[in-house]
């Protein structure tokens, strides 16, 4: 048996752990051949690949990023993308492709699968917003990095009696904001799922200072927005792939809060530091399990599906289920912190 693996979309701690696991299970345990396409779907579309053996994956378990490289190129971006992919799968004698990626990658995987290609997907995103799996690897690492940063920011905020508005990743969902905010004891959290009330946020922070506290930490998911018409707000735009580019919630909120409260405020954008570097032990384990189960699914001929974590069990779910809707933070989670505005 011969299978191809690729990593596509934004990188994420744990990608190398999946690649390693696929190679260990397929090559070592089953005696299969594995090739890795370079830079995501681009590698499949351009037939750019390398052989992956035990040596190729030596020492990569704890390494961030992806040894295969990644890009946001997808088959549907090309007029003949599906046909090219099919031709290369046939020419290379591949029995399966294992794409590791987020929502966009899995949509492309579904398209190829609907067109008859043998695909087993593996979900990844630090945002934790893929439906059909309880958790994605990368999320735990991102939350850990953001929490450490928030802990550090508290001491400098207190020294200067400042409001720090800390922007964490999360285009459409507030999982990282909610979990890092909870873990660090943030005083207010704003998430994309619930447009915030700027008056309520101002009073929440103001009451803290009125009670004699010397600082406040506001955690904002990058996709958070104010309720329509309540605050002048620049929504940002889109890049060449149609990917949202936010104008900067932290900068805008910090200016607004400084004006409204008469307290010094600063924006802090954590950005890609949340995605870089070594995965946590939890993410390494989850990624390794995903890789192992993806290979097993290939051997069972279970195509058009994706590995998923449900509770503590690994299951295979239809790709269609994974890409139908985003997994947003359920409203009942807000009450548990008391900080979501
Ligand atoms: O989806 C993962 C993610 O890190 C989002 O949280 C973020 O909005 C986006 O990717 C950033 O993408 P890029 O690396 O292309 O700027």
Image (cartoon, rainbow, N blue to C red):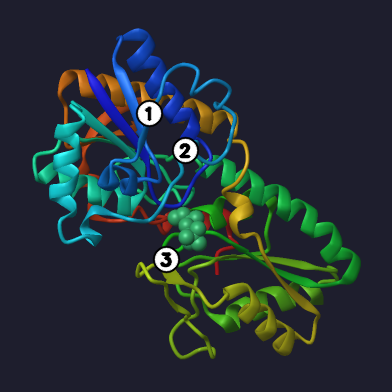
**Looking at the image, can residue 118 be seen?**
no
> Which residue: 58% across, 22% down?
59
> Which of the 4 quarters of the picture holds residue 173?
bottom left
Nearest to the observer: residue 76 or residue 160: 76
- The quadrant of the rendering that contains the N terminus is top left
> Which residue: 35% across, 14% down?
27
Residue 299 at what x, y percent from top left? 21, 18
Residue 186 at what x, y percent from top left? 67, 59
- Secondary structure of the residue carrying numbered label 2: loop
Foreground mark, 3 or 1, reads 1
Tell me which numbered mark, 3 or 1, is placed earlier along the sequence: 3
User: Circle 1 sits on which residue?
Assistant: 290
Query: Badges 2 and 3: C-beta atoms under 8 Å apart?
Result: no
Residue 329 at what x, y percent from top left? 42, 55
Relative to 169, say whether 262 is above or below.
Answer: below
- Tell me how many marks there are: 3
Tell me which numbered mark, 2 or 3, is placed earlier along the sequence: 2
- Distance between mark 1 and mark 2 Cα atoms: 9 Å
Could you say which disc has been placed on residue 137 in the image? 2
Nearest to the observer: residue 17 or residue 305: 17
Residue 338 located left or right of residue 321: right
Q: Estimate how packed mark 2 is, as few (under 14), some (14 to 19) or many (20 or more) residues with alpha carbons within 10 Å.
A: many
- Distance between mark 2 and mark 3 Cα atoms: 22 Å
Foreground mark, 2 or 3, reads 2
> Which of the 4 quarters of the picture holds residue 160?
bottom right
Residue 321 located left or right of residue 156: left
> Which residue: 19% across, 53% down?
81
User: Circle 3 sits on which residue?
Assistant: 193
Query: Badges 1 and 2: C-beta atoms under 8 Å apart?
Result: yes
- Distance between mark 3 and mark 1 Cα atoms: 28 Å
């Amino acid at each position: 048996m011969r299978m191809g693996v690729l990593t596509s979309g934004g990188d994420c701690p744990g990608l190398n752990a999946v690649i390693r696991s696929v190679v260990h299970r397929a090559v070592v345990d089953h005696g299969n051949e594995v090739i890795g396409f370079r830079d995501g779907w681009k590698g499949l579309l351009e037939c750019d690949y390398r052989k992956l053996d035990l040596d190729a994956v030596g020492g990569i378990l704890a390494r961030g990023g992806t040894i295969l490289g990644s890009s946001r190129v997808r088959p549907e971006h090309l007029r003949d993308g599906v046909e090219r992919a099919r031709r290369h799968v046939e020419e290379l004698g591949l029995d399966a492709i294992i794409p590791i990626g987020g929502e966009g990658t899995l949509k492309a995987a579904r398209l190829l699968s609907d067109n008859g290609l043998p695909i087993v997907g593996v979900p990844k995103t630090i945002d934790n917003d893929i439906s059909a799996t309880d958790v994605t690897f990368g999320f735990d690492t991102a939350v850990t990095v953001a929490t450490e940063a928030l802990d550090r920011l508290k001491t400098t905020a207190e020294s200067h009696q400042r409001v720090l508005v800390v922007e964490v990743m999360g285009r459409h969902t507030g999982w990282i904001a909610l979990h890092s905010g909870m873990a660090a004891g943030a005083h207010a959290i704003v998430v994309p799922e619930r447009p915030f009330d700027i008056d309520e946020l101002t009073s929440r922070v103001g009451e803290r200072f009125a009670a004699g506290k010397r600082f406040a930490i506001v955690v904002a998911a990058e996709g958070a927005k104010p309720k329509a018409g309540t605050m002048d707000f620049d929504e940002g735009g889109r890049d060449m792939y149609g990917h949202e580019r936010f104008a900067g919630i932290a900068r805008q909120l910090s200016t607004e809060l400084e004006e409204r409260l008469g307290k010094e405020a600063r924006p802090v954008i954590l950005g890609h530091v949340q995605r870089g570097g070594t995965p946590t032990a939890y993410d390494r384990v989850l990624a390794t399990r995903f890789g192992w189960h993806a290979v097993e699914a290939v051997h069972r001929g279970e195509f058009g599906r994706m590995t998923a974590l449900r509770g503590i069990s690994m299951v295979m779910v239809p790709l269609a289920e994974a890409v139908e809707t985003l997994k947003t933070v359920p409203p009942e989670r807000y009450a548990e912190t008391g900080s979501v505005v």
